[in-house]
Amino acid sequence: MGGLGALEPGSAKGALEAMLLVSGDPVPAGDLAKVLGTTPGEVAAQLAELAAEYADAGRGFQLREVAGGWRLFTHPAYHDQVEAYVLSWDTRRLSQAALETLAVVAYHQPVTREGVRAIRGVNSEGVISTLVDKGLVREVGREPGRSQAVLYGTTRAFLEHFGLRSLSELPDLEQFAPDEQARAFIRERLAGRRVTDDVDAEDEQADGLADDVRELEEDDA
């Protein structure tokens, strides 16, 4: 394995950029140094130079040292554009059932599988499992009382995928919808509803929604 000395002049920074591009978490300079066969100090100096070059060039991304490592970030100046693009990108790739379920979890968290089913009117266990596998939803605890049902909430990846800095920046529910039909469903059926401890009461309300939801989700539910 070649170190920095084995690389062409200037390509050391290119190697660091390439590794950072495939890293989803902050990477310590020591880890990068091991791959390049050099010292953490030399790598840290190269990374600092890269960070300064990006800033001077006015690039759309930044290189910052955070949480004990280095990571590439989108530039805060373009937050609005990134948010709009990522939101659009993700809604095209998530099924309608997944979007509706994700909206319920996002706006009613922490919520149980039964709570999600009560709001959507259909069994959502498979969709929740898919969202967990995608890293958008996770277990956040257990419901108090005898049921001890698993409670679900959104993840940091959810915030990153939808271009949000925190849950306080959640957009209107309708923005989760990929088309007008889904927007109408979310606007009329999900907006303003809240999961309560009285699941039976929610079930009675949900029964009236079941047929509507099934028509919307013949391929997804």
Image (cartoon, rainbow, N blue to C red):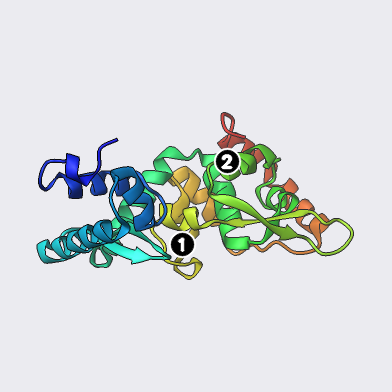
Q: Nearer the viewer, residue 25 or 190?
A: 25
Amino acid on which the number 1 mark rests in the picture:
Asp
Confirm or deny contact between disc 2 and disc 1 (CB under 8 A): no
Q: x%, y% of residue 168?
A: 48, 70
* Residue drawn at point x = 59 percent, y = 45 percent: 132
Mark closest to the chain's N terminus, 2 or 1: 2
In the image, taking residue 106 as reference, residue 9 lies left or right, namely: left
Q: Tell me the quarter of the picture where residue 76 sits.
A: bottom left
Q: Which mark is residue 65?
A: none
| Residue that badge 2 annotates | 133
* Residue 44, image x, y percentages: 27, 61
Q: Is residue 209 visible?
A: yes
Q: Position of residue 218 (x, y in %)?
A: 59, 30
> Compared to 210, does 107 lie above or below?
below
Q: Callout 2: few (<14), some (14-19), or many (20+) C-alpha neighbours within 10 Å?
A: few
Q: Residue at x 56, y 48 (%)?
A: 100
Residue projecting furthest to the bottom = 168
In the picture provided, is 136 more to the left or to the right than 52? right
| Residue at screen point 21% across, 58% down | 46
Residue 128, horizontal then vertical, whole percent: 63, 44
Q: Quadrant of residue 49?
A: bottom left
Q: Quadrant of the image for the C terminus? A: top right
Quick check: 196 left or right of 50? Answer: right
What amino acid type should be assigned to the residue bearing mark 2? Asp
